Image: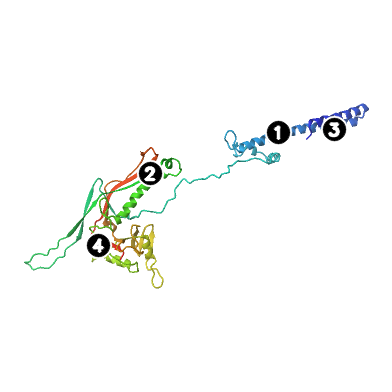
Amino acid sequence: MMNRTQYVEARKALVVEAEAYANEGSVDKFDAKSKEIEALDQKYDDSVKAKANQRALNERLQDLNSKMIGGNDGEAFDKTASSGIPDSWAKPSAERGQLLRANNAVKLTSTGILVPTHHSDSLSPTFNQVSSLLDLVQVTPRIGGESYEKSYIVGYGEGGEVADDADYTEDDVDFGKVSINKSKITSYSEVDQGVVELPDIDYDGEVMRGVRIAIRKRISRQILLGTGATNRLMGIFGTPTAINAATDLAPTVIDENLLDEIIYSYGGDEDVEGGATLILNKLDLKAFAQLRDANGNRIHTIRSSGNVGTIDGVRFIVNSACKRLSAAGVTGDFAMAYGNLQNYLLTIFSEIDVRRSEDYKFKSGQVAHRASVYAGGNVISHNGFLRVKRG
């Protein structure tokens, strides 16, 4: 590009030559020199305009660079109403090319050296920890009570033949009765205030749900293991009055005959009872599934969904409170129970009470959660369950 000094010197020389041709009367040479002067003037004007355009382009690129990395107004870049792209980009490709040629090192964005960590706003669930046994036994609400008594029939007598003038045969009906006393079952948990207020995940809501699950988990185990002592349920594996311990089975292994032994040992002498359910440990269920005949074929057909299913059409329910018959252990440990689940009565003496408080440990910023329920349970049918223990 021509600067002003170059332009002035060149024009002065051309003017001197033009004046000489005029003095000589050389019209053609004068006209030619005059055209050179006009061309020089046009060239200089173009050079001045080019410099002005260059300054404008540089200013536009600086403005674009500032907006792409965030201007004073906090916007990432200006947007056109139609396309949503920067104004500087909504130009013909030729002009964009000029912008890049004029300044092809354009800063488009800026990022920190540390990669940010992103957190999920949800919790992945764990496996089920509460047996469905709790939901399948018989439940009777007795809200506000202290205890509950339930009578049952042990058996009937048998008539006999006598002479016309002899006394009739005595055959009284034999009754039994069980008491169901209240047990206070509780759960308590604390979390820091920060756990409630800071994370995106609703930990606090899950803790509230957790104390209720803990109550259900405890009752489900006590239906089997309860000792019947003060403030305890009477469990099937305890010492319920309704079950004669002499009827318990004591096999040493799980073999191809055990399921039949259990089914035909349950109930009275006149019927094969239907509608019964086998309660067992998951690993004992596995032992049934692994039984094979001499040809390597499965002996039992097992279908399951969650913690319930069937073995050869016989209903089962998994409960981890059962000991493993298929593993080494203490002789006499109860491993299975078989019977109609309605023969166990769970009595609810109060609604489950779930509460949350920030007052108890206000000074240390702890949030307390608690749950409680008054409930009782017992076997309410004579030999309502056949129990299987390690032999």
Give the amino acid type for the residue marked by disc 2 in the picture.
Glu
- Dot 1, how many residues are within 10 Å of its Cα: few (below 14), some (14-19), or many (20+)? few
Dot 4: element: helix
x, y (%) of residue 154? 20, 60
**Spatial separation of the CA atoms under disc 1 and disc 2:** 67 Å
Give the amino acid type for the residue marked by disc 4 in the picture.
Ala
Q: Quadrant of residue 223?
A: bottom left
x, y (%) of residue 140? 26, 51
Q: Quadrant of residue 1?
A: top right
Q: Which residue is mark 4?
A: 245
**Picture layout, residue 105 above or below residue 270:** above
Precedes in sequence: disc 4 or disc 3: 3
- Dot 3, how many residues are within 10 Å of its Cα: few (below 14), some (14-19), or many (20+)? some
Q: Are marks 1 and 3 in contact (CB under 8 Å)?
A: no
**Spatial separation of the CA atoms under disc 3 and disc 2:** 96 Å
**Spatial separation of the CA atoms under disc 1 and disc 3:** 29 Å
Circle nearer the viewer, 4 or 1? 4
**Spatial separation of the CA atoms under disc 2 and disc 4:** 43 Å
Residue located at (23% from left, 47% from top): 146
Give the amino acid type for the residue marked by disc 3 in the picture.
Glu
